[in-house]
Image (cartoon, grey):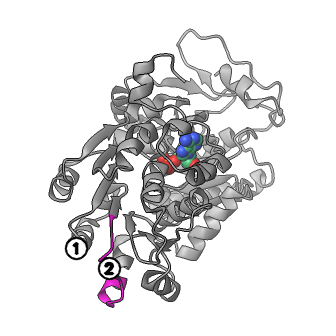
């Protein structure tokens, strides 16, 4: 708690300072949260009073609880089976996760939530919409399907949340969102959360919010806190080899690998599996069942690598992602920020590696400018950066299978070594063989 009473007054720093009912605080406590995140302390006091709100915050900042907690607080005394709050969210994963989170936070209340999203049957969702759920978390398309059937009654709606508005825009959902909004009661509280504020989202806010309080959690700061960024320059054709090499480090326990396209995601996952690295993949072309399975495999640690495209990974809430690897450097700095926000979630430490092909250097520079930091370049000791261009992936599968490592045996290697920055060489893992189980924190300090 800060010593400065002014600051304390301005920004509550414990959950006790926040105007939340003890039953809701109990849910928070059971999740193990001790302190509100900045977006939570800055939005909740106004949100519980019913004020409209714009929160500029990315995933990983705790923004979901920043709107769920005020919803629970405001509706606490109205468990009446009517729809009182609606959260619109761009992806089914986000809808499911927000609803799960709601269940946990609201465990000691009598309020009910329902997730409404495409790719599954309508029946159960219809039942929840007809009566039973006070809080509905929905993707726009599926919600419109239900609405067109005539049984969704929003007459009692008091609170609307637009979550990840910029992503809804990216995914082409804004017309659907506007259509839904035009059918909601005008007197209501509206909260809009977005990592960035492109003009269309600003317009949406202007059209549908009234004198909103604006709270901005600096995404740059959020991305910088707790994440160590490292760039690994590598010829493009050797990216997979380098990734396999990195993954030989068993302290990379839970790794999200981002690729630019679905096709590349599939290919990288396949190549990793061929080399004995348990990898699964998630992208927009996969069925709901496949996505759930992939996420489950990753969550439970059955597959320690999840290869994903940006849209699919958006909002995936996996506790303890240890590393994010940018197989492709994103051309948009904001995308980089979203990606690395997957690790170091809510102040945990995490690492972000970017495999940087020569043609991606400009993109990396733009990211550095946006972050206001120079991302360290490093080389992985022992990795052969001069290998020929032939795609050895499939032909060499047998050679690597079961090893989990790749590259030439006996040359390994230690963590990436910085290039030309005058730093001491890393305390590498000794000799060849697999990396030791040396504590991760310690080893990272040497990178
Ligand atoms: P979000 O930005 O909503 O995706 O949340 C990011 C992660 O932070 C989720 O895993 C939450 O469970 C977690 N989280 C949210 N609020 C807190 C908090 N006050 N303290 C610690 N973790 C939190």
The tag on residue 157 is none
| Secondary structure at numbered mark 1 | helix
In terms of depth relative to the viewer, which is nearer, 292 or 270?
A: 292
Count the numbered circles shown: 2
Element at label 2: helix
Question: Which residue is at a point 48% across and 40% down the rendered structure image?
Answer: 18
**Displayed quadrant of residue 282:** bottom right
| Rendered location of residue 333, percent (x, y) | 36, 38
Quick check: marks 1 and 2 in contact, CB under 8 Å? yes
The residue at the far front in this view is 77
Residue of label 1:
179
Residue 167 point in image, percent of width and height = 34, 56
- The answer, for residue 324, to whether it is visible in the render is no
262 to 136, vertically: above or below: above
Quarter of the image with the N terminus in it: top right
Residue indicated by mark 2: 144
- The residue that appears at 65% across and 52% down in the rendered structure is 305
Q: Is residue 351 left or right of residue 165?
A: right
Q: Residues within 10 Å of mark 1 (few under 14, many from 20)?
A: few
Locate the C terminus by quadrant.
top right
In reply to whether residue 269 is colored magenta, the answer given is: no
- Relative to 27, 214 lies left or right: left
Compared with residue 165, is residue 423 higher up or lower down, i.e. above or below?
above
Neighbourhood count class around disc 2 (C-alpha, 10 Å): few under 14, some 14–19, many 20 upward: some
Residue 428 lies, with reference to residue 316, above or below; the image says above
Q: Residue at x 66, y 44 (%)?
A: 32
Where are the magenta residues, as a range?
146-158
Percent position of residue 268, x then y: 57, 55
Q: Mark 1 or mark 2: which comes first in sequence? A: 2
What residue do we see at 67% from left, 50% from top? 30
Frontmost residue, 20 versus 211: 20
In the image, is residue 155 part of the stretch drawn in magenta?
A: yes
């Amino acid at each position: 708690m800060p010593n400065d009473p002014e600051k304390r007054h301005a920004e509550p720093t414990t959950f006790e300072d926040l105007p939340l009912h003890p039953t809701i605080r109990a849910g928070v406590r059971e999740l193990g949260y001790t302190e509100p995140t900045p977006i939570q302390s800055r939005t909740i006091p106004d949100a519980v009073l019913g004020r409209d709100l714009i929160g500029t915050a990315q995933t990983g900042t705790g923004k979901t609880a920043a709107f769920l907690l005020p919803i629970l607080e405001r509706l606490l005394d109205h468990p009446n089976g009517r729809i009182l709050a609606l959260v619109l969210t761009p992806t089914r994963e986000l809808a499911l996760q927000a609803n799960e989170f709601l269940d946990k936070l609201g465990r000691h209340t009598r309020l009910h939530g329902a997730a409404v999203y495409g790719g599954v049957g309508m029946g159960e969702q219809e039942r929840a919409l007809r009566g039973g759920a006070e809080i509905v978390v929905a993707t726009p398309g599926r919600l419109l399907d239900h609405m067109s059937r005539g049984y969704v009654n929003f007459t009692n709606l008091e609170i609307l949340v637009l979550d990840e508005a910029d992503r809804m825009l990216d995914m082409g959902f804004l017309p659907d969102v506007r259509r839904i909004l035009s059918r909601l009661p005008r007197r209501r509280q509206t909260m809009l959360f977005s990592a960035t504020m492109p003009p269309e989202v600003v317009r949406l806010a202007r059209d549908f919010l009234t004198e909103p309080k604006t709270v901005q959690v600096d995404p740059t700061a959020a991305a910088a806190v707790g994440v160590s960024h490292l760039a690994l320059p590598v010829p493009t054709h050797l990216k997979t080899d380098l990734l396999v090499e990195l993954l030989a480090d068993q302290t990379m326990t839970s790794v999200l690998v981002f690729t630019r396209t679905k096709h590349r995601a599939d290919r990288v996952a396949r190549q990793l599996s061929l080399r004995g690295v348990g990898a699964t993949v998630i992208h927009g072309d996969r069925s709901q069942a496949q996505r759930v399975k992939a996420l489950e495999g990753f969550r439970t640690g059955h597959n320690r690598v999840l290869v994903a495209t940006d849209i699919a990974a958006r909002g995936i809430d996996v506790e303890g992602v240890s590393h994010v690897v940018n197989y492709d450097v994103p051309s948009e700095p904001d995308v980089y920020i979203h990606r690395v926000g997957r690790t170091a979630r809510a102040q945990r430490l995490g690492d972000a590696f970017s495999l940087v092909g020569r043609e991606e250097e400009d993109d990396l520079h733009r990211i550095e400018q946006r972050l206001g930091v120079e991302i360290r370049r490093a080389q992985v000791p022992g990795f052969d950066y001069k290998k020929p261009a032939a795609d050895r992936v499939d032909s060499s599968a047998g050679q690597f299978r079961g090893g989990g490592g790749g590259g030439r045996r006996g040359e390994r290697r230690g963590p990436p070594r910085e290039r030309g920055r005058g730093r001491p060489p890393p305390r590498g893992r000794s000799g060849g063989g697999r990396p030791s189980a040396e504590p991760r924190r310690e080893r990272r300090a040497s990178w």
